[in-house]
Amino acid sequence: MKTARFDAADYLKDDETIAEYITAALEDPDPDVFLAAVRDVARAKGMAQLAKDAGLGRESLYKALTPGAKPRYDTMLKLLNALGVKLSATSIQP
């Protein structure tokens, strides 16, 4: 039996799905999950175009989204803004 390799980027076609995907990744305590989600969205949108829209070099974008990377907050804000996503905070208190 053959199976196709799953690639989340293939399913990130609209802004609502992208926002839900990023939100779900933010709920995971592992920061690499968030970076992987942003990387998936970046690939879905096009890395070169995202780098241009965010005002970053393509190499800088790849470096920022590498597993284990510790990108600066302002870099992530530029990326999320270019992706059309904004972060928000909610209380964790019941």
Image (spheres, grey):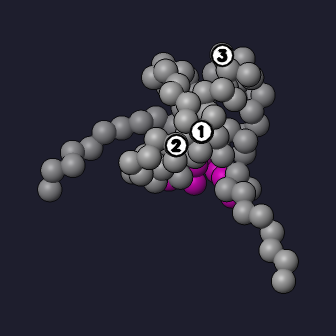
Asked if residue 59 lies left or right of residue 15, the reply is: right
Please name the amino acid that badge 1 sits on: Pro
The image position of residue 37, as x and y in percent, is: 58, 46
**Which labelled disc corresponds to residue 55?**
3
Residue 45 drawn above or below residue 12: above
Q: Which residue is drawn at 69% across and 29% down?
A: 62
Tag 2 near tag 1, CB within 8 Å = yes
For label 2, the residue is: 32
Helix, strand, or loop for circle 2? helix
Within-10-Å neighbours for mark 3: few <14, some 14–19, many 20+: some
20 lies left or right of 41: left
Could you tell me if the residues under marks 2 and 3 are in contact, i.e. CB atoms within 8 Å?
Answer: no
Q: Earlier in the sequence, mark 1 or mark 3?
A: 3
- Of tags 2 and 3, the one toward the viewer is 2
Which of disc 3 and disc 2 is earlier in sequence? 2
Relative image position of residue 11 (x, y in whole percent): 69, 58
Mark seen at residue 67: 1
Label annotation for residue 76: none
Please state which amino acid type lies under the numbered disc 2.
Answer: Asp
Mark 3 residue type? Gly
Quadrant housing the C terminus: bottom left
